[in-house]
Image (tube, rainbow, N blue to C red):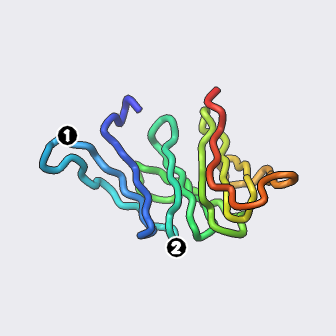
């Protein structure tokens, strides 16, 4: 993102997200700027919105969270999976969200945290480990 060229976002089994600033200093290349709390279990995936203002995380607590990075807080909580959420993604226009879970489903959501579709008929026979939207 041109607005935040030196930002990295990480997720962890410690149940937190960290926003990092890259300093390019050999002694300390990355400095934590903000730590985000909210999930009650391991965070398995995190992605940034294309404008760099929001993050989306998926967790073993069976939820997704939409984060306002400037405020450092959750703005929406997505609840419909019955097992760990393993993968999350934004559509190119940031208006749709997709998630994959250990419950063998793919879910499509709007940004208001409403699950619009669950895809599982004739689908995967095991965990959905990764989901992505087409870039065009």
Q: Position of residue 59 (x, y in %)?
A: 56, 64
Label 1, on which residue?
A: 24
Farthest residue, direction top:
136
- Horizontally, residue 66 falls left or right of residue 81, namely left
* Residue 106 drawn above or below residue 12: above
Q: Position of residue 49 (x, y in %)?
A: 52, 41
Q: Name the element at disc 1.
A: loop
- Horizontally, residue 126 falls left or right of residue 129, namely right
Residue 83, picture quadrant: bottom right
Crowd tier of the residue under label 1, counting other residues whose Cα lies within 10 Å: few below 14, some 14–19, many 20 or above: few
Q: Which circle marks residue 134 in the picture? A: none
Q: Residue at x 51, y 59 (%)?
A: 74
The count of marks equals 2
- Tell me the quadrant of the picture where the C terminus can be found: top right
Q: Position of residue 14 (x, y in %)?
A: 41, 70
- Tell me the quadrant of the picture where the N terminus can be found: top left
Residue 90, picture quadrant: top right
Q: Position of residue 51 (x, y in %)?
A: 48, 35
- Out of 34 and 41, give the one closest to the viewer: 41
- Horizontally, residue 105 falls left or right of residue 90, namely right
Q: Residue at x 63, y 38 (%)?
A: 91
* Residue 15 drawn above or below residue 100: below
Q: Residue at x 34, y 42 (%)?
A: 7
Farthest residue, direction left:
27
Q: Which circle marks residue 40 in the picture? A: 2
* Residue 118 drawn above or below residue 50: below
The Cα atoms of the two marked residues, 1 and 2, are separated by: 33 Å
Q: Name the element at disc 2.
A: loop
Crowd tier of the residue under label 2, counting other residues whose Cα lies within 10 Å: few below 14, some 14–19, many 20 or above: some
Farthest residue, direction front:
125
- Is mark 1 in CB contact (under 8 Å) with mark 2? no
């Amino acid at each position: 993102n041109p607005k935040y060229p030196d930002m990295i976002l990480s997720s962890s089994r410690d149940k937190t997200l960290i926003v990092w600033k890259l300093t390019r200093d050999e002694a300390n290349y990355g400095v934590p700027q903000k730590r985000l709390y909210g999930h009650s279990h391991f965070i398995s995936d995190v992605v940034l919105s294309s404008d760099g203002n929001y993050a989306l995380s998926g967790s073993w607590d069976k939820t997704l969270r939409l984060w306002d990075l400037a405020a450092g807080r959750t703005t929406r909580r997505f609840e419909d999976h019955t097992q760990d959420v393993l993968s999350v993604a934004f559509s190119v226009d940031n208006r749709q969200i997709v998630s994959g879970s250990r419950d063998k489903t793919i879910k499509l959501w709007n940004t208001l945290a409403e699950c619009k579709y669950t895809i599982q008929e004739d689908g995967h026979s095991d965990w959905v480990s990764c989901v992505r939207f087409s870039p065009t």
